[in-house]
Amino acid sequence: MLLTSLSAHLLQFCRWCNGSFFGRGIRDSVWLFPFVEIFHLIALGLLGGCILILNLRLLELAFRDQPTARVARDVRPWMIGSLLVMLASGFLLFSTEAVKMYGNWAFQLKMSFLLLAILYTFTIHRNVMLAERKIAPTLRALLAAVSLLLWLGVGLGGRAIGYVTTAANSVSGGTP
């Protein structure tokens, strides 16, 4: 019952996005979708670089002369900025085909990984990065591996979206 209600609300939100000023405006423009996508991809590259830097430091494969907490503090503004640009541009891109994305398992996978990756990065991973105490190398490797796998899941899910087709009619109740 709760899942059915949540699903109905999500579909209603997707329909709203499809018909919104953003959805229609970007969808109907020749150049706006690629323009927004450029920002999305640049932010993706920046965020990926930040995640890689943090995890290489956590694994002690790079930046060994710098304390882990300092690397984390130095990278944090870039990571947060790029994540915000990615989320904003991602919403704009999503709004152009929201109903189609609603039924796309690759999009659902990407969003699940994104939620988990953000929660993990800004809780467990952050606390470990800022901890001044020495952490066992095995635990550091495990924490870095989890981080990298979660963000890899976001990227692979995003890449798979274009290869998964969803009939809009099957999702929207017969209205494309």
Image (cartoon, rainbow, N blue to C red):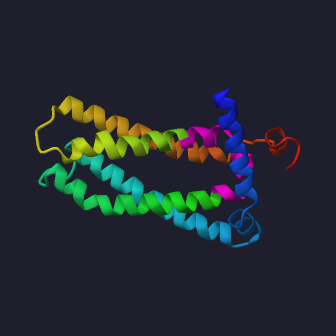
Rendering coords of residue 158 (x, y %): 57, 47
Q: In the drawing, does residue 50 fall left or right of residue 156? A: left
Quick one: 164 or 133, which is closer to the camera?
133
Q: In the drawing, does residue 115 fall left or right of residue 165? A: left
Where, by quadrant of the figure, is residue 81 drawn? bottom left
Res. 27 in view: yes
Q: What is the magenta range? A: 94-111
Compared to residue 138, the image places residue 64 above or below, namely: below
Most common secondary structure along the magenta stretch: helix
Quick one: 141 or 20, which is closer to the camera?
20
Compared to residue 84, the image places residue 175 above or below, namely: above
Which residue is depicted at the point 67% across and 57% down? 95
Which residue is depicted at the point 56% across and 66% down? 38
Rendering coords of residue 126 (x, y %): 28, 46
Rendering coords of residue 80 (x, y %): 38, 59
Number of marks in the rendered image: 0
Q: Residue furthest top?
A: 1
